[in-house]
Amino acid sequence: MSPETERSAALSLMNAAAVRERAHELLVLALGDRLAHFAVDLDRLAVTAHVVAEKIRVSYPQRDVPFHARWRHFVVDGIDLWAQRAEAAAWASPAARARAAFDLAIVSVLLDAGAGTAWHYLDPETGLVVGRSEGLALASLRMFEAGTFSGHKGAPLRADASRLAALTEDDLARGLQVMESNPLVGLSGRAELLARLGAAVAANPKVFGLADAPRPGGLYDHLAAEARDGVLPAPRILEALLLHLAPVWPSRITLGGLPLGDCWRHPAIKRGDATDGLVPLHKLSQWLAYSLIEPLQWAGIRVTEIDGLTGLAEYRNGGLFVDSGVLALREPDEAYLPQQVDSPLVVEWRALTVALLDRIAPLVREELGVSAEDFPLARVLEGGTWSVGRGLARDKRPDAGPPIAVVSDGTVF
C-alpha cells in the first residue's frame, strides 16, 4: 500500500463521522449478541432517559442548558471565574481575547484526563478543595492566570509554544499541588502531553502563528479564516484539532505517518483496507472541540452542525449505561480487574457509550418536549447524562469511581 493511500486511510478516521459510524457498528453487533464483553438491554434505555430528563428539569427549569464544555468547570459557587478575569483584562481586539480563551481551553482540556480518587486541589483564592475534573480545571485556570504557560513577561494570560515545550513534570506538579500525600494519576503523561503540544505548535507556524508567536490559541485565526460568511461547522473544529495536533498524542497507532491518537483496535470491526479493526474515539479532542465553540461565538463566528460531533467516550457517560443496566459485562468479575485502555473490553465500552448517547438523546428530548435543533447532544450531555452518571457513581461506590477499573496514563480518560 502506497504512503498516499495509507495517509488517506488515516484521514478517514480523523473525524466525528468515523467515530459515529464505527461506534454504531459495534452497537449493532452487541444487539445481535455478537460482542465478547458486553450485552445491551435497550429496554433499560427509556428508563434511563426518564432519569436524565428529570435531572435536566430540576437543574434547568427553563431548559437553558449550556453546552458541555470546559467553561462550565470554571464556574465555582455560581461565579464564572474566567468571565470575571476576561472582563477585567484589556484586550487589543475580540480576536486577542479569543486566542487567550483558546490557549486556556486547549491546555486545560489536555490536562483533563481522569485525576483518580485521591487527588484534590486547594484553591488559594476561595479556600475550596476540589477534586476530579473540576479540580483540574480550577488548577489549570490558576496556573494560566499566574503565567505558568506564558513565554512573555508581563502577559500572563496566554500559552506559548516555547514555554509549553520547556514545561517539566516538577513545574506541573507544583501547579497541581501534587505530592506524596496528594497523588495524581498520570502526572508524567500530562507533562509529556503539554511538552509535545508546545513542540507541535512551534513546528507549525502556518497554523498556530498567523497573528502572533506560535501558541495553541493561534488555532483561532486558522479556524476564523476557514469560516465562510462568518459560519463554521463544528466538525471542522474537530478535524483541525485532529490534523494539526496529531503529533501531541503518545505513540500508539500510526497510519501513513499520522498518529491516530485516541484510536484503538477491536477484532469485530472488519474492513478491506488499512483501517481494518480500528475504532476511533477521539474523546479529549471532541471535548476540546465542544470547548472551542463558545470562544468562536464570543468572537462573532456562528458555529453550526453541533450534532456533527459525537458524545464523549469517557467514564461518566459510560458509567451511566453500566450503572443503569443498559450495558452489562458478560463476565461481571472483569469490572474489578484493572483494564488497559487498549483492551477490547474498554474499546467496546467506550464505543458503545458513544452509540448509546445517540440513542438516548432523542428519548430525552421527547420527554422534555424540545427539538434537536434547540437541544443538541452537547446540551443533553451537560444537563443530564454526565451528571446522572456521576450521581450514580456516588450512590454505588464509596470513591464515586467508574464501574470498571481502567488503567489510565492521564491522556485518555
Image: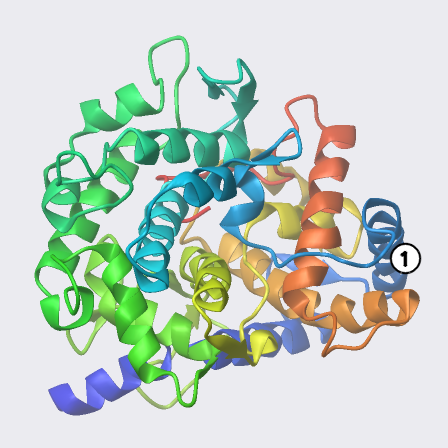
Q: Amino acid at mark 1?
A: His
Picture residue at 77% right of the left edge, 66% below the top: 360
Nearest the viewer among 46 and 26 is 46
Q: Classify mark 1: helix, strand or loop.
A: helix
Residue 188 higher or lower than 71, as above or below: above
Residue ID at (41%, 48%): 109
Q: Tell me, yes or no, if residue 277 can be seen here.
A: no
Other residues around mark 1 within 10 Å, as few (<14) / some (14–19) / many (≥20) = some
Q: Is residue 404 left or right of residue 191?
A: right
- Write down the residue under mark 1: 50
Q: What residue appears at the point 33 percent right and 67 percent down from the top-left corner?
A: 241
Residue 165 seen in the figure = yes
The quadrant in which residue 273 appears is: bottom left
Is 22 above or below relative to 80? below
The correct choice, above or below, for 405 with respect to 380 in the image is above
Q: Picture quarter containing residue 247?
A: bottom left
Q: Residue at x 19, y 65 (%)?
A: 208
Q: Quadrant of the N terminus?
A: bottom left
Task: State left or right for residue 66 relative to residue 82.
Answer: right
Residue 152: give x, y in percent of width and height.
13, 40
Q: Position of residue 400 (x, y in %)?
A: 66, 29
